Amino acid sequence: MMLKAVIFDMDGVIVDTEPGYKIATDEVLREHGIITSDEYQDQFIGVTNEYMWGTIIREFHLPLTIDQCVDMVNKKRAIMEERDGLHPLPGVIDLIKYFYDHGLSLAIASSSPMSEINRVVDLFGIRKYFQAFITGTDCKESKPHPEVFLRASSALDLKPEECLVIEDSKNGLLAANRAGMKSIGFANPAFGNQDLSSATKVVPYFSQVTMEMCQTIMNK
């Protein structure tokens, strides 16, 4: 199958936000007497805030709403980002431009809200390279359900099998598979020990990715 589009996850693929999310979430939970393991939090990488906090509230009987939890996390993240800044993952901007220059259609399919997607693409100056932005908050189901990726291929007016997904999480890669899309798993140990075994190809560095590699992946 000929490669016609690349669909990027955002957090942990384009922007270095996963550690901040984890730290802020851990602080909110500890403030309410809840201590969890890294493995517990890792299961939520790639899902929507609604799914994650809905699960946590239910499992720990937390006397808060989803909106309250998200607001507390965002306030803590804002303090960290004011101090440390917000940065793209090494090599990802060059990769986006590389795909664009080779005539591929590009989309972002993220579990983050559209306000976060807009903030990142404008901060990094990459809006012009993308034809579609899909947020999981508009979907009925969260990753690992394939809805967000199927919406992305539809927005690009392409078949799912013509699209390649770049993801960093188990949930995201499962969603890509269920959408009928081939995938590249970005292995970054800073974002948790994610199970990337369902990826068609795993890479630790974006500089390794070439058009030849991607077309080989599409033909597997």
Image: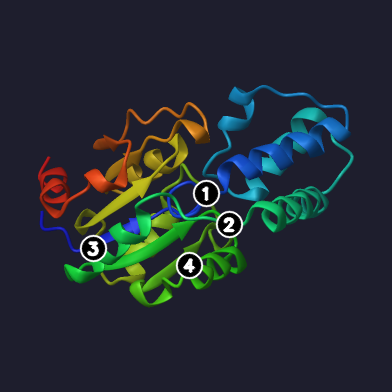
From the viewer's perspective, is 76 left or right of 96? Answer: right
Q: Residue at x 23, y 63 (%)?
A: 99
The quarter of the image holding the C terminus is: top left
Give the residue furthest to the bottom: 128
Res. 124 mark: 4
Residue, disc 2:
86
Residue underneath mark 1: 16
172 vs 191, nearest the viewer:
191
Q: Are marks 2 and 1 in contact (CB under 8 Å)?
A: yes
Residue 35 picture location, percent across and down: 78, 24
Residue 202, given in percent of the width and then of the height, sits at 28, 35
Density class for disc 1 (Cα within 10 Å; few <14, some 14-19, many ≥20) is some
* Alpha carbon distance from label 4 to label 1: 12 Å
Q: Amino acid at mark 3?
A: Tyr
Residue 138 appears at what percent x and percent y? 56, 63
Question: Badge 3 is on which residue?
Answer: 98
Q: Earlier in the sequence, mark 4 or mark 2?
A: 2
